[in-house]
Image (spheres, rainbow, N blue to C red):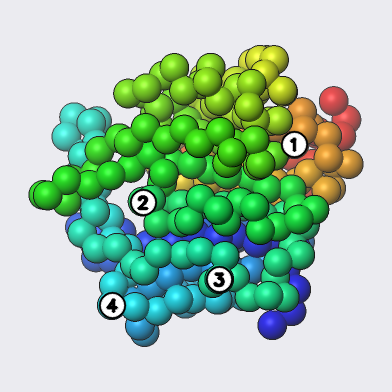
Amino acid sequence: MTQPNYLIVGHFTADVTPQGRIAGGTVSYTAPIARAFGHEVGIVAATAVGESLLSVLLPYAQLSVRQGTHTTTFENIYDHGKRTQYLHHTSLPLSAADVPSGWMNAPLVHIAPLVDDLDYDIVHQFPGATIMLTPQGWMRRRDDNNRVHFKRFFDEKVLRKVDIVIMSKQDIAEAPELEQEYAPLVKHLFVTDGERGGTYYHQGTPEKYDAVPVTEVEPTGAGDVFAGALLASLPLLNHDMRAATKVAARLAAYSVTRQGIENAVTPQEIQEALALARQE
């Protein structure tokens, strides 16, 4: 295995749809983005033995997979625009012990829990890295009927350790006070709000950013595209967070105009977004 410079730690999922099982999870959306930016991508995940859907990631990343009985499996049911989410199966949990030793020095690390399936201590294992956390998976629990519900996540040690936290207004709809509780603890906090843009907190100080207006076709994965593009663009923009925010917002907007993980954004769109961010 070669040393990746963009490491994603999080569970790969199988999403149940009327058309059958499809690949999902943060790793599935962010790996193609990071690769399109030119990064060498490594993924640490867990699935069932022989999970065939993993093949969609092979063009984009090296894989280190913990194998068990199940692949984490979600089903989303929509009724008049309201989503009910079910978690049918969970993979084995992940910890720092699952990360290949040669990957511990990756300069860009994305911690991406999906359903309380990562050890919190993993954020302390990457000295010198820029660490981004998308905490939605630490904000989920399931009941006895497999239905997914909100779970409050607040761990000061974790929040102070990571460099970037990205979450959506929807993630914290049941505990909106978390936005103000996280803000003074995290160096860079982003609270996204779809077509309304979002708020970027730099060491607790808020500033709004705008979304790029587009005609939405499929919103799934837009938050993951935003997160992946933000982290992937930072070293290409001299770690200018505001410039990276503009790139991330533009590419997330492009991603909702089409369907499919592999079609989220194109290399040409990435280069255009980087060029615009450098000019502004």
Q: Quadrant of residue 47?
A: bottom left
The answer for how far apart the CA atoms under marks 4 and 1 are is 39 Å
For disc 2, the neighbor class at 10 Å (few under 14, some 14 to 19, many from 20) is: many
The answer for how far apart the CA atoms under marks 1 and 2 are is 28 Å
The mark that comes first in sequence, 3 or 1, is 3
The mark that comes first in sequence, 2 or 4, is 4
Residue found 40% across the figure and 27% down from its top: 172
Secondary element at tag 1: helix
Name the residue type under label 1. Answer: Ala
Secondary element at tag 2: loop
The mark that comes first in sequence, 4 or 1, is 4
User: In the figure, is residue 214 to the left or right of 268?
Assistant: left
For disc 3, the neighbor class at 10 Å (few under 14, some 14 to 19, many from 20) is: few
Q: Are marks 1 and 2 in contact (CB under 8 Å)?
A: no
Residue found 56% across the figure and 33% down from its top: 156
Name the residue type under label 3. Answer: Ala
The answer for how far apart the CA atoms under marks 2 and 4 are is 17 Å
Q: Quadrant of residue 72?
A: bottom left
Secondary element at tag 3: helix
Q: Quadrant of the C terminus?
A: top right
The answer for how far apart the CA atoms under marks 3 and 1 are is 31 Å
Secondary element at tag 4: loop
Residue 6 appears in the rendering:
yes
